[in-house]
Image (cartoon, rainbow, N blue to C red):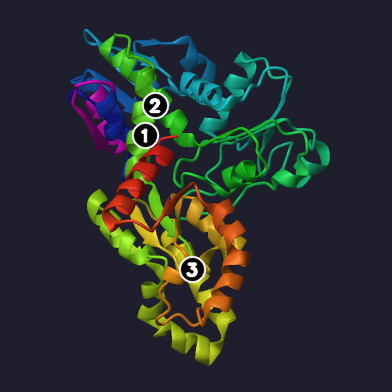
Amino acid sequence: MEYGLLGAKLGHSYSPRIHRVFGDYDYQLYPVTEEELRGLLRRRDFRGLNVTIPYKQTVLPYCDEISDTVRLIGSANTLINREGKIYADNTDLPGFLTMLRWAGISLRGKKTVILGSGGTSLTAQAACRQENARETVVVSRSGPVTYETLTRDHADAEVIINATPVGMYPNNLQSPVDLSAFPHLTGVADVIYNPARTALILDAEERGLPHTDGLHMLVAQAWHAARLFLNAEIPEKKLAQAYRAVRWDTLNLILIGMPGCGKSTLGKQTAQALGRQFVDLDAEIEKTAGPIPDIFARQGEAAFRDLESQVIRQFGKESGLVIATGGGAILRRENVRALRQNGVVAWIQRPIEYLSRKGRPLSTDDGALRRMAETRTPLYQAAADFTVCNTGTRGAAVHILREGFYEAAGS
């Protein structure tokens, strides 16, 4: 065993992908029981390990030396074998502080609310002490400050940090608090990294607040750990490279635009170019409910929109897809949020006279299409990360889609 990650249930971890960016060393996942963990630590046949829940405290009795950060937080996430002796450190704290720095969020002199009281909360509390936050408020279901008393007593919070799993996959689009109750906010951080944008982050984004997702912390703590593993400096530019590598793999590419603008055709070709699965949301609706014109005729537009919202919720939480939406997908705010939570959104533009009308119940004539475009254009514009004009060759449009996705996903 050279390097790797220890935990009880690791599932699909991004850590090996991240560590490949930082150095040419073997990094594997090691899901172990507590008994297996103890045996591994006694044998000491490893060079360096990261440790995740539930073993960050379990490993401490087996360590010969612990860092000041471990003493401060009370847990370790990095173990180094130094000639048979185990040195324990915790890179979550410097990773957390690096995440805040990237986002331009300062704790200094700020009243900071930390949601949750578990292990990640302890890291956030240590960060508040180190950065001289003016006041730190820890919120939990049974603590002195609860979610029921938070908005009453602490509406003057300036920074909110979510250190709970609320909003994490598969329970997407849930939020632990309503940001509208905190008018003095200057920053929002969420340690969750799947989805890329939790409901909390989407709310912060809509309010124009500095914000950060948990992938920044995951990448930064891995960077600090890799430097300990190798006992060498690693250029900080590698941080952005590792972040992009994971985001490119996990974010969806979402195509929006008027009915008949070419979303499905371009989506299929772009998915092939990216080596991804393609999902046509209208086709998914038809699999269970029948042809869309029949749905409109039998049940009306409102019933169709409900079906559309259902499939958007289903596929919007997934990762690594190319998704073509129906033309009216952006009519509901909930749909846009469900698509943006894990996606880069591309608006496909095409002149009205070139739009296909076959099988499209609302595309009856030029007048209807122009009225539709007038209503929907501001919504497409607000939802999109970038725009593709579909008036040239398909190959040219696919190239723009690929380049636009990579640029937006890596920012």
Tag shown at residue 240? 2
Range covered by the magenta-colored residues: 22-41
Seen from the viewer's position, the closer of residues 63 and 227 is 227
* Farthest residue, direction bottom: 298
Residue found farthest to the right: 152
Q: Which of marks 3 and 2 is in front?
A: 3
Q: What element carries label 3?
A: helix
**Mark 1 in CB contact with mark 2 (< 8 angstroms):** yes
| Residue 23 drawn in magenta | yes
What residue would you read off at disc 3? 352
Placement of the C terminus among the 4 image quadrants: top left
Which residue is denoted by mark 1 in the rendering?
244
Query: Tag 1: Cα neighbours inside 10 Å, few (<14), some, or many (≥20)?
Result: some
Residue 52, given in percent of the width and then of the height, sits at 38, 32
Task: Mark 2: give few (<14), some (14-19) or many (20+) Cα within 10 Å.
Answer: some
120 vs 88, left or right, is right
